[in-house]
Image: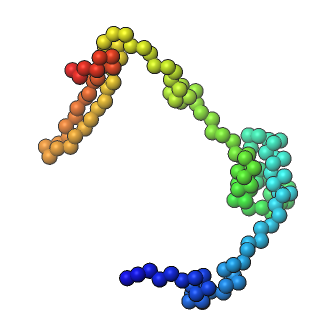
Amino acid sequence: MGTVWAGNVLALTLAQFVRASWYRKGQAKDQTALRWRIRDRAHTRPPFGYLRIWVLLRREGWPVNRKCVRQLYRLDGLQLQMRVCRHKHRALHPGPAPILTNPNAGAWISCMKLWRPAGPYRILNVVDQWSRPVP
């Protein structure tokens, strides 16, 4: 069975949908004053997140939604970066690899598990990095 291609007018007519509402452009409210207020609050109190800024705005009398504050907060680039722990930072950047000069100075270890009908079969692989013989 083939695909039937139709234009927008035909598709809207068949769906009994009004064309004026299909082509209507959304009218967004001007939120520059709110954006300035959010930015001002974020710069005066940097550790505050968007939720605490939303609470402060509600106390000041701004009738604003929490989701709207979050969206404007992120659009202005005020979202704080996640902090990385020291030990995680060290693990991500371990430094240069040591230069191996003799056998058995460093080795790769990997474990494998094969499933057989009799049960799991475990294999431990140890590979020497310098000469790469498999014992």
Residue at the far left: name it. 118
Q: Position of residue 134 (x, y in %)?
A: 23, 22
Foreground residue among 35 and 53: 35
Q: Position of residue 4 (x, y in %)?
A: 47, 83
Q: Is residue 51 visible?
A: no
Residue at the far top: name it. 102
Q: Position of residue 100 (x, y in %)?
A: 39, 13
Name which quarter of the figure residue 81 lies in: top right
Name which quarter of the figure residue 86 lies in: top right
Q: Is residue 89 visible?
A: yes
Q: Name the residue located 81 percent from the left edge and 48 percent from the top edge.
A: 39
Name which quarter of the figure residue 106 lies in: top left
Q: How many marks?
A: 0
Which quarter of the image is occupied by the N terminus? bottom left
With 119 as the anchor, is 85 left or right in this view? right
Q: Name the residue located 58 percent from the left edge and 87 percent from the top edge.
A: 10
Q: Name the residue located 63 percent from the left edge and 35 percent from the top edge.
A: 83
Q: Position of residue 118 (x, y in %)?
A: 13, 43
Colour scheme of this structure image? rainbow
Foreground residue among 16 and 40: 16
Which quarter of the image is occupied by the C terminus? top left
With 109 as the anchor, is 83 left or right in this view? right
With 127 as the anchor, is 48 left or right in this view? right
55 versus 124 height, above or below:
below
With 27 as the anchor, is 33 left or right in this view? right
